[in-house]
Image (cartoon, rainbow, N blue to C red):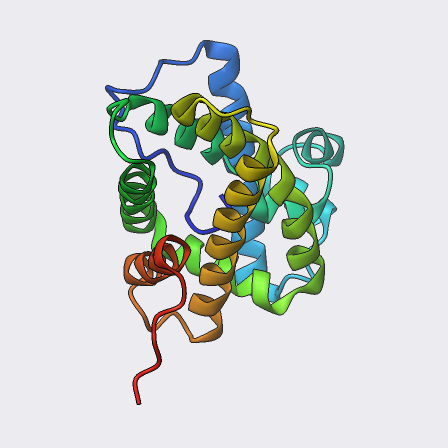
Amino acid sequence: MTGMTAARSPLSSSDRPQPGLRERKKTKTREAIRAATYALVREQGYDATTIDQIAERAEVSPSTVFRYFPTKEDIVLTDEYDPVILAEIRQRPADEPWAKTIRYVLHRAVRLGASEDEEVSRLRTRLMVQVPAVRSRMMESMSATGRMLCEAIGERTGRAPDSLEVRVYAMSLIGGLMETSLYWAENDHRDDFTALVDRALDVMEHGLPRENR
């Protein structure tokens, strides 16, 4: 979701439905392509890294890379995260306030994602800041995440997922998380990311705080 974590699931292995052999092979191929891309970017930079190099490092064909990821930017940004977020939201108590649900889910996702591969999280957010093509593609991908979140909000609140209010709330949340990721990277990842997410959620829930004078 907006590149804020590595491509890991916030659910424990016992909670997740077990995929079949074909899906496991697809996941293994996607992970190999991502790992090859991250390694090459660390070694020589994003712009110098080509699809042919990624394919060779991942031991697949260039056409296979494109079959899984339409653009190089998608390799950096795409993960398995959105369906997992939706599943996690659905597991929360039906009468739990929405603000508490989303805070809980994001806390857990950020904590587990960072602990499993914090270096990848930092690399992805640095690229979001430093590479205009990555940032532009990220903006395009937000609409898919927005539709997923609208569905979750609609289920929880009983509102129509395509209503104006739900769409505005969902995209405000996604935009806030995107800006939080950019802020984290722009400030050399000094801050605790979970604390930054909390600050962003506080603003969305309560509005701008008063300035300290």
Position of 9 with respect to 158 (left or right) is left
Total numbered circles = 0
Question: Which residue in the rendered view is the most extreme toward the top?
Answer: 20
Query: In percent of the image, x 41 and y 55: which residue is there?
Result: 204
Query: In percent of the image, x 53 and y 52: which residue is there?
Result: 38
In front here: 161 or 78? 161
In front here: 175 or 44? 175
Query: In percent of the image, x 44 and y 51: which residue is there?
Result: 4
Q: Position of residue 187 (x, y in %)?
A: 43, 76
Tell me the quarter of the picture where residue 143 sits.
top right
Position of 117 with respect to 162 (left or right) is left
| Above-or-below relation of 181 to 52 | below
Position of 43 with respect to 139 (left or right) is left
Question: Which residue in the rendered view is the most extreme toward the bottom?
Answer: 213
In front here: 187 or 94? 94
Position of 162 with respect to 179 (left or right) is right
| Above-or-below relation of 103 to 192 | above
Query: In percent of the image, x 69 and y 46: which residue is there?
Result: 140
Q: Position of residue 119 (x, y in %)?
A: 39, 57
Q: Position of residue 17 (x, y in %)?
A: 35, 14
